[in-house]
Image (cartoon, rainbow, N blue to C red):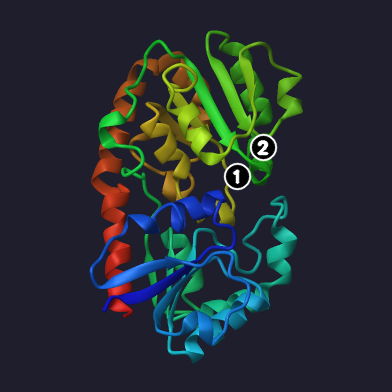
Amino acid sequence: MRKKILYFALDKRDTTSFFRVHGILPYINNPEFELIPISGQVEFDWTVFQGVSAMIFQRPFVEAHSQVIKTARNHNVKVILDYDDLLIDDAVDMYNPTHALYKYNQTSLKECLRDADEIWVTTQEIKTHYLPYNDNIHIIPNAHNDYLFKVKDKLKFNPKNKKCFWRGGSSHDADVMEKADFLVDVINKNKDWEFGFMGSRFTYIEQRTGDNHSIIGAMPIMEYFRYLNSAIYGNPQLMMFPLCNTKFNAAKSNISFLEGTYAGAAFIGNKELPEFNLECAYDIKDLGDILKYYESSLKDANELAWEYICDNLLLSKINKLRENRILANI
């Protein structure tokens, strides 16, 4: 009989769930266990955990989540937690909309970490900071979903498509604003390039730049991928993702690097941060020089980045890590 493994996300439709739970677990098919989604479950008692071997719980942090973990373990269910951000102590930056939420729930968050049988995280930085609370932590990085977005369909670098693209929500407002004056200067000095900003609005930049600054409305995740990977609307030469050098950002994974590379772009980010310090990426401080002097090297950067992803960060490979960890817990 196949063992039953439950999985639960706080919001099954958000981006973190796409990369960590509901967008990746359905692609695991193993004869020894069955993965069963229960996101949306409100009450957790013996009727939920009867005959269950393990539960994967994404991002628990409040007292109610801690009680679910205790209830599961009381029913001899192994509990695996998954975190894609560094959430303890003062890590969540004050400018992040969730700062107060996580600050208020630190006691419950740490209790969740202590009570888990195993924890999966995206980066070494998260593991390092969580180790004092649990010594059974495994790094399972975010990956390019090659089931949904086939390797053969990757967009090629387009030397005629002089677009530089940014995307992000309000949690990244301070990251962009730290570079606002610099970005205004670069945008205004490179009128032959189009700079597209999707998601948050930055009026301080908008008011000081011209027609080569495009505002793109936020989209549901699959529409966003369709847009970015469209030869007509997307396919930029550069994907930029400036981040402040903070403890929270130092633990971030490089999802924007995955997205941009598949769309045919070279990537430019903050190379002071571990996950963005890649040989096949550029540093945001050099953006102006890259557009002026290094445009001919962008194609090589994109191809090297895609080679790195295919070798290390395809979901078909990374899911083997999850599969092996599940088998170790049943």
Q: In terms of secondary structure, where does tag 2 sit? A: loop
Based on the displayed image, in which of its 4 quarters is residue 42 positioned? bottom right
Task: Tell me residue 229's x, y (percent).
Answer: 42, 27
Number of marks: 2
Q: Amino acid at mark 2?
A: Glu
Q: Amino acid at mark 1?
A: Cys
Vertical comparison of 320 with 223: above or below:
below
Q: CA distance from mark 1 to mark 2?
A: 7 Å
Task: Tell me residue 57's x, y (percent).
Answer: 50, 70
Based on the displayed image, in which of its 4 quarters is residue 91 positioned? bottom right
Give the residue at x 56% y 37%: 242
Q: Look at the image and tell me whether residue 142 can be seen.
A: yes
Q: Which image quadrant: the C terminus? A: bottom left
Q: Which image quadrant: the N terminus? A: bottom left
Q: Look at the image and tell me whether residue 252 can be seen.
A: no
Circle 1 residues within 10 Å: few <14, some 14–19, many ≥20: some
Would you name the residue on which mark 1 appears? 244
N-terminal of the pair, mark 1 or mark 2, is 2
The foreground one among 165 and 281 is: 165
Are circles 1 and 2 on residues that touch, CB within 8 Å?
A: yes
Vertical comparison of 262 with 288: above or below:
below
Q: In terms of secondary structure, where does tag 1 sit? A: loop
Give the residue at x 25% y 65%: 30
Give the residue at x 37% y 33%: 262
Task: Tell me residue 104's x, y (percent).
Answer: 74, 70
Task: Tell me residue 259's x, y (percent).
Answer: 43, 37
The foreground one among 153 and 283 is: 153
Answer left or right for 209 relative to 122. right
Vertical comparison of 237 with 118: above or below:
above
Vertical comparison of 115 with 263: above or below:
below
Circle 2 residues within 10 Å: few <14, some 14–19, many ≥20: few
Would you name the residue on which mark 2 appears? 178
